[in-house]
Image (spheres, rainbow, N blue to C red):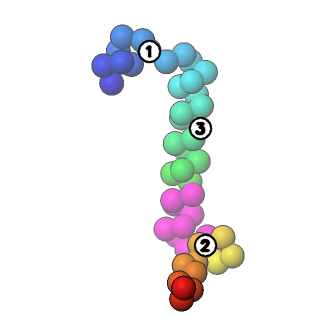
Amino acid sequence: MAYWLRRPPSRQHVYVMAIVAALAALIVTIEHLGYWPDWMTAQRMPRSPL
């Protein structure tokens, strides 16, 4: 944060960070409400015996 006070990010950089944060919040909300499709959920693969 001290770095940002000394050298504030450009307006474009702030817009990109805001869009990324909004997309992350949207994905979390969709998953929390139960609308996330099962085919997009990561599954743990069983460990193969070596």
Question: Which residue carries the number 1 mark?
Answer: 8
Quadrant in which the N terminus is drawn: top left
1 or 47: nearer the viewer: 47
Label 1, residues with CA under 10 Å away: few <14, some 14-19, many ≥20: few
Do the residues under discs 2 and 1 have CB atoms within 8 angstroms?
A: no
Q: Is residue 36 above or below residue 7?
A: below
Q: Is residue 26 visible?
A: yes
Q: Secondary structure at mark 1?
A: loop
Residue lying at the far front of the rendered structure: 50
Magenta span of residues: 27-37
Q: Residue at x 59, y 72 (%)?
A: 42
Q: Amino acid at mark 3?
A: Ile
Give the mark toward the camera: 3 or 1. Answer: 1
Q: Residue at x 57, y 63 (%)?
A: 30
Question: Which residue carries the number 3 mark?
Answer: 19
Q: Amino acid at mark 1?
A: Pro
Q: Is residue 1 above or below residue 31?
A: above
- Dominant secondary-structure state across the stretch colored magenta: helix
Q: Is residue 35 visible?
A: no
Question: Sequence-wise, which precedes: disc 2 or disc 1?
Answer: 1
Q: Amino acid at mark 2?
A: Thr
Question: Sequence-wise, which precedes: disc 3 or disc 2?
Answer: 3
- In the rendered structure, does residue 28 fall within the stretch colored magenta? yes
Q: Residue at x 59, y 48 (%)?
A: 23
Quadrant in which the C terminus is drawn: bottom right
9 or 29: nearer the viewer: 9
40 or 28: nearer the viewer: 40
State the CA–CA distance, disc 2 to disc 1. 37 Å
Question: Which residue carries the number 2 mark?
Answer: 41
Residue lying at the far top of the rendered structure: 6
Q: Quadrant of residue 7?
A: top left
Question: Sequence-wise, which precedes: disc 3 or disc 1?
Answer: 1
